[in-house]
Image: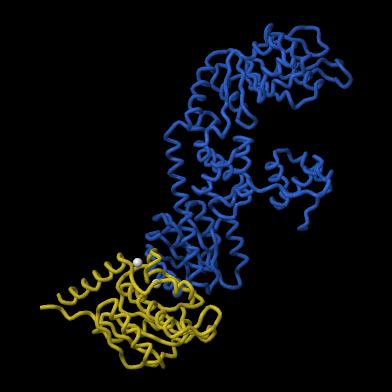
């Protein structure tokens, strides 16, 4: 009997345009070939706010997300607030390596390096790239040295724009294997 | 650059977690320690490529831990983690051997660049260690001479043969090729090795001084000769006399030298008695003695007396394959001497050194490596550190092309580059400190930083 494919739940954290959620869901579905659901909006927990940084703690948010939707293979939080890990100035996203939760912030993705608004197409692509990258980590992928791979690390906008919206052959192979293995694991 | 072994040392859980998290996502194997003692325990057990080290920890300061790491694991790269208030300590840590520092909070991109750079350097250091081991396995060092090239291997064999006989030797080679090292090797391998090795550079003395240096003098031989003094010939008794730049011996004195070599006895200046001596003569020249004979500047009979066995030392440009080896050899020597933690040299830099012509031969290479080590900021020397080799000399002021002006300019520049460390500058310039001090005074040079 074919097993139920693992699915990804996109969880809006705080107020967001519904379009961005749908576009990201479409990209993930198209590239990973797995079903994606969009959940109900959840408020950003205030205890994750770092007052002197005016940012939210991505580590604590991941811990918060981890408790959601255990029936899904992966939960991806999308938020419009600025997130960081305390040692860093900022992060675009965060994930548990080989875990359950991933997170993307759209806060820094809507403008170019000079602070001008970018087109919707560029904005959606960036959000989708960060989302796929963080989901990759949830499925145990490391950063990739291949310039033509979404698992290449970049914490800068121009770097992010150079990265393609797909996985290199090696990462894609590993990712598919992880998805398959997890599915088999759930069966037994 | 995946799969490096990394240790994160910090008393704050949040720092450990977020750094470890990021490093694991980059594919590295990461351990952590909450304090200095735990960290040192782990470092003794595991060889880490990279250590992130907090400057302030309750049980032990990061600086103390750093010093221990540098001691027991000098190849490990250390990045200090600091907060806004402790940048000065971080700078101090870099002087003690830390590779770099990060100030919290830092750009994630910055972390990536730094980790990549240091792991690349680490790999070069490992390759260099490998090279060193390969070097040790082959016979590339002969006394103080270094070379794996066929011509140097032949030279080592020749020295071995020559050392066994007691005849005079003439060593030929360009300036800086290491003629004195060849002479010393002959001495060290000969039956005279327990006797003295006495060297004199015949070109370094004015005529009358060279004579008294070589032959010595009796008290009262000339004004100022208060006490009897032995000359170098006499000092070489039982050992080897090395006459460097033998072509510079004035014609008049050549006959005296010939007599010493033929009769094995001589007189001190102003002396009546003949003193017998037993030494082996090894002479060297960078010039063309045959040409000097034709011009009448050098005696043919002395030439034949000196040139019983001839050894040619090849210029560096004819044995470019030895440049990497020599660079490595000088690097480890200057690392010891200067106490700097420069561990390696990139392939790219070696290729650049191989492409250079080395008119000053091994000595120029030695000076170049020393200069690069002294001024190095990283643990690895790159091509950039040798850019000075191809730099055009700075343009001097109009009409200021006298030798003195050039010398003044050059000394000033070297002093600036060494941060006015006179000993360092003197070594780079190839003169002693006293001479440099005199020149600083003479040219009225001043440290503009003070
Ligand atoms: Zn990542
Ligand atoms: Zn990849």
Nearest to the observer: residue B116 or residue B89:
B116
Residue pictured at 46% horizontal, 73% vertical: A155
**Which residue occupies the extreme left position in the image?**
A1
Q: Which chain is yellow?
A: A
Q: Is residue B24 visible?
A: no
Residue A28, located in which quarter of the rendered image? bottom left
- Asked if B326 appears above or below B152 in the picture, the reply is below
Residue pictured at 50% horizontal, 38% vertical: B325
Nearest to the observer: residue B73 or residue B422:
B422
Specify the quadrant that holds the N terminus of chain B. bottom left
In percent of width and height, residue B358 lies at 60, 38
In percent of width and height, residue B66 lies at 53, 58
In percent of width and height, residue B155 lies at 52, 24
Residue pictured at 41% horizontal, 67% vertical: B23
Image mark count: 0
Left or right of B431, for residue B173: left
- Asked if B41 appears above or below B311 in the picture, the reply is below
Q: Is residue B83 visible?
A: yes
Specify the quadrant that holds the C terminus of chain B. bottom right
Q: Which chain is blue?
A: B
Nearest to the observer: residue B431 or residue B385:
B385
In percent of width and height, residue A58 lies at 42, 81
Left or right of B434, for residue B344: left
Q: How is the image coloured?
A: by chain
Residue B229, located in which quarter of the rendered image? top right
Nearest to the observer: residue B153 or residue B22:
B153
Left or right of B149, for residue B172: right
Picture quarter with ligand 1: bottom left
């Amino acid at each position: 009997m074919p097993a139920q494919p693992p699915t990804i739940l996109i969880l809006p954290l705080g107020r967001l345009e519904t379009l961005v959620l749908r576009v990201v869901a479409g990209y993930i579905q198209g590239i990973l070939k797995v079903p994606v659901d969009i959940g109900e909006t959840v408020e950003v927990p205030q205890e994750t706010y770092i007052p002197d940084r005016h940012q939210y703690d991505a580590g604590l948010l991941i811990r918060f997300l981890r408790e959601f939707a255990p029936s899904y293979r992966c939960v991806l939080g999308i938020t419009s607030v600025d997130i960081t890990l305390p040692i860093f100035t900022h992060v675009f996203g965060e994930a548990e390596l080989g875990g359950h939760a991933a997170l993307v912030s759209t806060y820094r993705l809507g403008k170019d390096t000079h602070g001008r608004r970018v087109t919707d197409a560029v904005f959606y692509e960036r959000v989708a790239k960060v989302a796929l990258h963080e989901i990759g980590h949830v499925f145990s992928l490391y950063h990739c040295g291949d310039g033509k791979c979404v698992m290449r690390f970049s914490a800068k906008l121009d770097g992010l724009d150079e990265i393609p919206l797909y996985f290199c052959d090696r990462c894609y192979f590993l990712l598919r294997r992880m998805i398959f293995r997890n599915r088999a694991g759930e069966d037994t | 650059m995946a799969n490096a072994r990394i240790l994160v040392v910090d008393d704050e859980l949040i720092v450990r977690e977020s750094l470890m998290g990021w490093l694991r996502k980059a594919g590295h194997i990461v351990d952590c320690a909450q304090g200095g003692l735990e960290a040192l325990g782990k470092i003794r057990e595991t060889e880490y490529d990279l250590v992130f080290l907090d400057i302030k920890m309750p049980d032990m300061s990061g600086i103390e831990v750093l010093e221990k790491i540098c001691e027991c694991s000098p190849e490990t790269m250390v990045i200090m983690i600091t907060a806004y208030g402790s940048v000065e300590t971080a700078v101090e840590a870099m002087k003690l051997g830390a590779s770099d520092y990060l100030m919290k909070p830092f750009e994630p991109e910055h972390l990536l660049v730094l980790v990549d750079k240091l792991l690349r350097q680490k790999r070069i250091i490992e390759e260099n260690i490998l090279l060193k081991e390969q070097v040790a396995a082959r016979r590339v060092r002969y006394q103080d001479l270094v070379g794996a090239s066929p011509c140097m291997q032949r030279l080592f064999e020749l020295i071995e043969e020559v050392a066994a006989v007691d005849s005079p030797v003439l060593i030929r080679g360009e300036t800086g090729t290491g003629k004195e090292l060849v002479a010393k090797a002959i001495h060290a391998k000969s039956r005279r090795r327990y006797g003295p090795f006495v060297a004199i550079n015949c070109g370094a003395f004015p005529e009358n001084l060279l004579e008294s240096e070589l032959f010595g003098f009796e008290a009262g031989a000339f004004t100022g000769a208060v006490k009897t003094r032995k000359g170098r010939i006499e000092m070489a008794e039982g050992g080897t006399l090395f006459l460097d730049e033998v072509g510079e011996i004035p014609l008049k004195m050549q006959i005296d030298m010939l007599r010493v070599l033929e009769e094995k006895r001589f007189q001190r200046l102003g002396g009546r008695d003949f003193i017998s001596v037993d030494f082996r003569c090894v002479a060297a020249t960078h010039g063309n003695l045959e040409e000097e004979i034709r011009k009448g500047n050098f005696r043919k009979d002395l030439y034949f007396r000196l040139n019983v066995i001839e050894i040619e030392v090849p210029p560096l440009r004819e044995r470019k394959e030895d440049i990497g080896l020599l660079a490595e050899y000088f690097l480890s020597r200057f690392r010891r001497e200067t106490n700097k933690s420069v561990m390696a040299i990139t392939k790219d830099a070696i290729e650049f050194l191989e492409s250079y012509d080395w008119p000053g031969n091994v000595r120029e290479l030695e000076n170049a490596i020393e200069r690069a080590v002294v001024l190095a900021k990283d643990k690895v020397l790159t091509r950039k550190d040798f850019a000075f080799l191809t730099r055009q000399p700075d343009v001097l002021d109009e009409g200021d092309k006298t030798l003195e002006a050039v010398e003044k300019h050059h000394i000033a520049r070297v002093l600036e580059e060494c941060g006015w460390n006179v000993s360092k500058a003197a070594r780079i310039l190839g003169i002693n400190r006293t001479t440099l001090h005199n020149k600083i005074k003479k040219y009225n040079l001043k440290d503009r930083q003070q």
